[in-house]
Image (cartoon, rainbow, N blue to C red):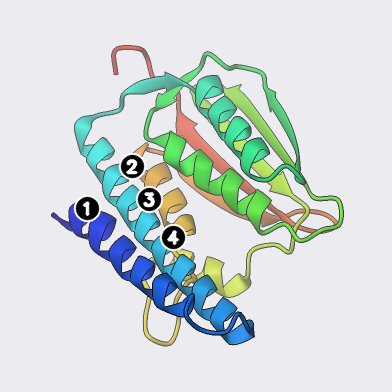
Amino acid sequence: MLNRILRHNIRTETNIIHGYVDRFADDEDARTVKRRALRIEEMGQKGREAIELFDEGRAGSDPKPVGRLLEQCVESVRRECPAVSVEYDCTDPDARVAGLLSTVFENVVENAAEHNDGDDPHVRITARQESDRVRVSVADDGPGIAPYELTVLEDGTESALKHGSGLGLWMVKWGAEIAGGTVDFTENEPRGSVVTVSVPVLSADD
């Protein structure tokens, strides 16, 4: 029910906002309203993805090759953000991990690319199997993740006075934990962030 409401009602309301704004002068105020309406629609989409993430967690592990999941992310970001140079290196593409991690990887890579404000933006994705775990690191040379965002994630809760800007990082945290793993956020040098997801390797029967 919540998924249906998010899918239909939010999109309907934002479409109405866009329709009315189109009647106004095409000035900065009108463009700001349109950007905010798009932001609301994007949050609705993230909400639907979060619901689907928990549904997948209840359904089981659904092991998938990590290489396949990452290749889909790379193809998507190269298509959506052609100005961003994406490097990809996966030494153990056949290592199986929980299928729901596709949402985790998509959000990490999307965040690294979309918010990269550099003149020559780069994103580097590396994946390695280390014993019984797979470590996937996504490094960028963008502005980095704001400290208050990471504080909210570490505390595990939000309040009226301290909150994050959206669901993307929460979905990374939730998805990694549902898959039995962890996520770490560190600074990149000389600029940017490194997000590392470490999850168990699964067998085809898990």
Residue 116 place in picture, x, y as percent = 72, 57
Residue that label 2 marks: 178
Give the label on residue 3, or none.
Answer: 1
Q: CA distance from mark 3 to mark 2?
A: 6 Å
Q: Is residue 106 above or below residue 203?
A: below
The nearer-to-camera label among 3 and 4 is 4
Q: Nearer the viewer, mark 3 or mark 1?
A: 1
Q: Which residue is mark 4?
A: 42
- Give x and y (percent) for residue 6: 26, 59
Identify which residue is drawn at 63% across, 25% down: 128
- SS at circle 1: helix
Q: Which of label 2 and label 4 is nearer to you?
A: 4
Question: Separation of disc 3 and disc 1 at Cα?
Answer: 18 Å
Q: Residue at x 22, y 53 (%)?
A: 3
Instruction: Give whichever of discs 2 and 4 has the lower sequence position.
Output: 4
Q: Residues within 10 Å of mark 1 (few under 14, many from 20)?
A: some
Residue at image mark 3: 174
